[in-house]
Amino acid sequence: MIKFDSVNVVFERKNEQFTAVDNVSLQIDQGNFYGIVGPSGAGKSTLVRTVNLLQRPTSGNVFVNGQNVTSYKDKELRDLRLGIGMIFQHFNLIKNASIFSNVALALRASNTPENEIKNRVYELLELVGLKDKADVFPNLLSGGQKQRVAIARALANKPKILLCDEATSALDPDNTKEVIATLKSIKENYPLTVLFITHQMEVAKTLFDEVAVMEKGRVVEQGSCYDIFAHPQSQAAKNLIKCSIKGVIPEEILAHEKDLYLITYKEECAYESVISYISRQFNLDISIIAGNIEYIQKKPLGRLLISLKSSDEQSKAKALAFIKEKAFVHEFNGEI
Ligand SMILES: Nc1ncnc2c1ncn2[C@@H]1O[C@H](COP(=O)(O)OP(=O)(O)OP(=O)(O)O)[C@@H](O)[C@H]1O
Ligand SMILES: [Mg+2]
C-alpha cells in the first residue's frame, strides 16, 4: 500500500520557487497495478521518487505499507529502500558484469549469505525467463532482455512494491510486449504493488487497474483504467487518449464529413443493431467513418464515428435520443 497525503515538492530555481508536485493525495492499494500518466514535466517522476525518498517531499506525508516514511533516516531509510524495487527507462545494468553478477549485486547489497546467492539468482532469472543468459554480458542482450534483468535485480530482495519509471519507453513494440508479459506473469504469482509511469497509452491500457493523470504537478483525474479511457473528463486525459487514436482517421476525410458523432458504447451494447435500427426507423443515411473495439481490463470498449446525414432535423434528433439511451454520444469535434 502506498498513500500520498497532500504531498508537495518545491524546487528552488534561480531564486524562484517551482512547485513540481502540487498537493497530491492518492492511495494505491496492495496488489494494484497503478499507472501515472501525463505530459512531460507534469511531476510524475518527482512524485514517484518520494515513495523511496529519492526525493523528500517539501510538505505532506508518504505512507508505505501503513508507515509514515517521510522522516525516515539511516537504517530505517535503508530498510525502506530494500523493500522497494525500482526500474528505469535505460535499465542501468553494469556493463562489465555478467547477468548473474548484475542480479547478485542486489543480494550482496542486502547482506544475503554468500551460500544462498547462487540459488536465489537462478530463481530470479527463471522468473524473468533468462536463466540461460546467466553468464552473458548485457551488451549481448536485446532491450527487452536487459529490462527483464533489471526486473530480476529489482525483485532480488523480495520487495512488496515495484516502481517503474518509463520502463518500456526505450523499447520497440516487440520488446515492450515482452516486458509487459513478464510483469504480468510476475504479478500473477507474486504479491506486488506496482506504480508505473508511462506516456505510452497502449501500455497503460494493457497493464493498469487504476490510473492517475498528472498535469503541472497536480493529479487532475484518477480512477479505474477502463473509466478513464472510456470517458476522460480532464483536458489532459483527453489529450493523451486522443494521441492514442490519432492517425486512425485521415484529416482530409474529417474535413469533408459533416454532422459527425462519436458513439462510445456501453459494455454490453452491440454496434450493428443500433445503427441498422435507427437507419430504418428514422430513414437516415448513416456512414461509418471509423470504429474499433478494444479491451481494457478484459472489458470491451467500443467507439464508432458516424456521419448522420438528414434533411429532417426532427428525425435526426429522435435518432440521437435513441442512441443516447443505448450508448454515450457526443458531437465529434476532433477529440474524444
Ligand atoms: N532536482 C530538480 N531541481 C529543479 N527542478 C526539477 C528537479 N527535478 C525535477 N524538476 C522539475 O520539476 C518538473 C517535473 O519534473 P519530472 O521529472 O517529475 O516530470 P515528469 O512528469 O517525470 O516528466 P517526463 O515525462 O519528461 O519524465 C519539471 O519541470 C522539472 O524540470
Ligand atoms: Mg519522468
Image: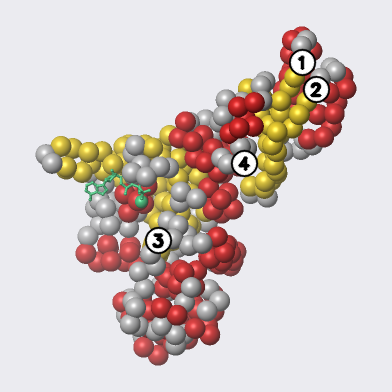
Q: Secondary structure at mark 2?
A: strand
Dots 3 and 2: beta carbons under 8 Å?
A: no
Asked if the residue at label 2 sits under 8 Å from ligand 1, the reply is: no
Measure the alpha-carbon separation of dots 2 and 4: 23 Å
Q: Quadrant of residue 258?
A: top right
Q: Which residue is mark 1?
A: 310
Q: Considering only order in the chain, which callout, 4 or 3, is on the residue closer to the N terminus?
A: 3
| Residue located at (49% from left, 83% from top) | 133
> What is the number of the mark on residue 91?
none
Percent x, y of residue 89 = 40, 61
State the residue at coordinates (52%, 79%).
130
> Label 3 amino acid?
Gln
- The reply to whether discs 2 and 1 touch (Cβ–Cβ < 8 Å) is yes
Residue 178: image quadrant is bottom right
User: Which residue is outermost to the left?
Assistant: 15
Q: Which residue is mark 3?
A: 89
Q: Residues within 10 Å of mark 1 (few under 14, many from 20)?
A: some
With respect to residue 251, does 244 lie above or below?
Answer: below
Q: Secondary structure at mark 3?
A: loop
Q: Amino acid at mark 4?
A: Val
Q: Quadrant of the C terminus?
A: top right
Marks 3 and 2, how far apart in space? 49 Å
At label 2, counting other C-alpha atoms closer than 10 Å, the crowd grade (few under 14, some 14-19, many 20 or more) is few
Horizontal placement of 186 versus 3: left or right?
Answer: right
Q: Position of residue 22 (x, y in %)?
A: 31, 37
Task: Name the residue carrying label 4.
Answer: 248
User: Label 2 belongs to which residue?
Assistant: 285
Tell me residue 196's x, y (percent). 45, 54
